[in-house]
Image: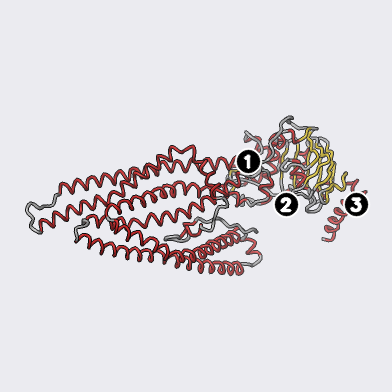
Amino acid sequence: MSKIKKPQSGGQVGHGPGGGNMMMMGQKAKDFKGTLKRLLIYLKPRRNQLIAVFFAAILSTVFMIVGPKLMGNAITELFEGAYGKFQGVPGAAIDFEKIGQILLVLAGLYVLSSLFSYVQQYIMSSVAQETVYDLREDVNKKLEKLPLKYFDGRSNGETLSRMTNDIDTIGSTLQQSLTQFITSIVTIIGIIIMMLSISPLLTLIAIVSLPLSIFAIGPILKRSQKHFADQQRTLGELNGHIEEMYTGHQVVKAFGHEKKSGAQFDQVNEELYKAGSKAQFISGIIMPMMFFIGNISYVLISVVGGILVTQRAISIGDIQAFITYSKQFTQPITQTANIANIIQSTVAAAERVFELLDEGEETKDITTESLTRAQGAVTFEHVDFGYTEDLLIQDMNIDVLPGQTVAIVGPTGAGKTTMINLLMRFYELNGGKIKIDGRDTRNMSRSDLRNSFGMVLQDTWLFKGTIKDNIAYGKNGATDEEVFAAADTAHADHFIRTLPDGYETVLNEEASNISQGQKQLLTIARAVLADPPIMILDEATSSVDTRTEVFIQKAMNLLMEGRTSFVIAHRLSTIKDADLILVMDQGKVIEQGTHEELLEKNGFYADLYNSQFSEKVAG
């Protein structure tokens, strides 16, 4: 069982400043500028929308920033009127009409701010989703063009992660963080301008607290980063262990490893607890420390502001507005720092997506020859092939006549499956030619070539859907009658009709609601329905019982009549009647002939056959 670690989103583990984002700090792009420029190319068609978002963000923020200043004017008006009346100044009174006008303007500004904020979020969500849509389309088209060796060399989880998690990260950042970044920058600049307009001295006090905060929390951030990295690593290990034990729970129970599995879980869980508690504790210190430094600044501003008010150098309303601005000042700075970390992670995610998009594609089809319904003649002429620089198959020569049944036998790693991969053109040859009906397979489209083949593999593949849909996968536009007839030929009809919903029975994602043998019967029925001129059978009856195997063998014999068939066999007793047996070893065909001819040679095949026969007698 292989351990699969699913990527975790930062927000799930860690709260407060630097919480979830600290975990993403470890993800750095190799080429930040290049990847960012490439990502901006996807945004270029939507530059008008982005300009609208930019201006909407500015207007929304400006209207919000002006609010405290107007509120301060209202408080000043109220205070001066009340103070003058208290002092007995003639004609002094609170001008409620003026205060009402100020409050009305203030309410209008907040409404406009909310309106522009809604506009920017609406447009940006559209931009983000359209960009993500384009990325997914490009990735999907790329996956269709990638050669089989790409998928053989990488886990499915990694490819899926790039197409889903990484693209989702890009979309989330575009939709949320980009507008927050614009808003935060405008807010910082606007607040500084408003504070300077009220009092340069108080502004200096407020700004001095900023480097003090950075100096104080810098060492804490460095220490918490290590613990957050450990937390993410152990969380991945724990998820991987849980998934591994869950998917293989039958094996765990069969071999009595429940206690060992539980002990391993406890060990990893304990590591996660220690790393998580340290990370959360250290990062939890940040907010109180920032509050402490902010409160010192608040006290200084209040004291100095009070002195300035007594000296009539500043109004009390302006002090109230300034205190509001000073409290708002640290928030956009913290957001900007967090967004910088998110952008790092996003560019790293984009780089992973672009790496996939830059992968080498399959060589383009050269369709100088067409193939409609092949007769089934197959020829290998001096074929050379290797997955790496070392050749696995050298100078292979085979001549198969239409309608012949060809069995391929040999030890593990002999090159049996490789030969089939080359026949289907899943891999390109290093040298030589493979011909179908005298036509070079490299001169025809892969679609035409593969439509000539039907495959029944030892490893069954069924998708989530009804049994009828799974069988109908073998032929576009297949009728119900054709599906039923194919299932009947494959001896699958009886067991299907015994199911509660018959052909409408829905298979789950792993098709675990039917047996392995029944899965194989469905894949055989699918091949029967396809009715191809050439069949490939990779030990197709290995997963069925002896009685079913007899039926399947009969069905296969009917299916193989009049068509060329390649049978990869492990049990040599099943291929005695083959027209041609190819004996492979270390990528070479070392013997070929009929069953009787090969036994008479008393060579490699005879040794293989007699060893299996001896094992059965001894058993």
Q: Which mark is residue 603?
A: 3
* Location of mark 1 (residue): 144
* Structural crowding at the residue carrying mark 1, measured as other residues with C-alpha within 10 Å and reported as few (<14), some (14–19) or many (≥20): few
Q: Position of residue 545 (x, y in %)?
A: 73, 52
**Which one is earlier in the sequence, the residue at label 2 or at label 3?**
2
Q: Residue at x 90, y 46 (%)?
A: 596
Q: Nearer the viewer, mark 2 or mark 3?
A: 3
Q: Where the N terminus falls, by quadrant?
A: bottom right
Q: Residue at x 26, y 44 (%)?
A: 108
Mark 2–mark 1 CB contact (< 8 Å): no
Foreground of the two, 256 or 408: 408
Element type at mark 1: helix
Q: Position of residue 537 (x, y in %)?
A: 75, 44
Amino acid found under the numbered disc labelled 3: Gly
Marks 2/3: CA–CA distance: 31 Å
Q: Position of residue 488 (x, y in %)?
A: 69, 40
Amino acid found under the numbered disc labelled 2: Asp
Quarter of the rendering containing residue 291 = bottom left
Q: Where the C terminus falls, by quadrant?
A: bottom right
Foreground of the two, 185 or 289: 185
Query: Is residue 555 depicted above or below 278 in this figure?
Result: above
Amino acid found under the numbered disc labelled 1: Glu
**Which one is earlier in the sequence, the residue at label 3 or at label 1?**
1
Query: Is residue 133 depicted above or below 184 in this figure?
Result: above
Element type at mark 2: loop
